Amino acid sequence: MRHWINPTRNGGCMRASRWLVTIGAMLAIAAGQGVSAQTAATAHTNSQQEKMKTCNADASSKGLKGDERKTFMKSCLSSG
């Protein structure tokens, strides 16, 4: 039976440490990618929310109601 981590054979401690460092680095990279993806999604959500607030305020200030408001909101949200 072969032991993967055996400190008594051919520098086993060093190999075990290198293995643990490699696994730790891979996990850190994976976690960092997940955080950056969440940050990008949050930024997109915030910009959409801000756009909705702005368009809604513009429609209210113009006194739009019903189909006119719906048409305005559609064009406002799809622009830019």
Image (spheres, rainbow, N blue to C red):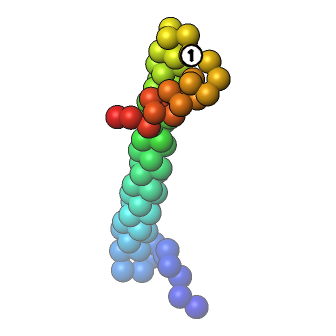
Q: What is the tally of numbered marks visible in this picture?
A: 1
Q: Nearer the viewer, residue 26 or 80?
A: 80
- Rendered view: 17 above or below 68: below
At x 42% / y 80%, what residue is drawn? 9
Q: Nearer the viewer, residue 64 or 39?
A: 64
Q: Residue furthest bottom?
A: 1
Q: Is residue 13 visible?
A: no
Dividing the image into 4 quarters, which one contains the C terminus?
top left
Q: Which residue is mark 1?
A: 64
- Rendered view: 30 above or below 49: below
Q: Amino acid at mark 1?
A: Leu
At x 50% / y 27%, what residue is drawn? 72
At x 41% / y 74%, what residue is drawn? 12
At x 44% / y 56%, what residue is drawn? 30
Residue 8 appears at what percent x and percent y? 45, 76
Check disc 1: other Cα within 10 Å, few if <14, some if 14-19, many if 20+: some
Dividing the image into 4 quarters, which one contains the N terminus?
bottom right
Residue 2 appears at what percent x and percent y? 53, 88
Using residue 3 as the reference point, say whether residue 33 is left or right of it: left
Residue 48 appears at what percent x and percent y? 48, 32
Using residue 2 as the reference point, say whether residue 16 is left or right of it: left
Q: Secondary structure at mark 1?
A: loop
Residue 62 appears at what percent x and percent y? 50, 11
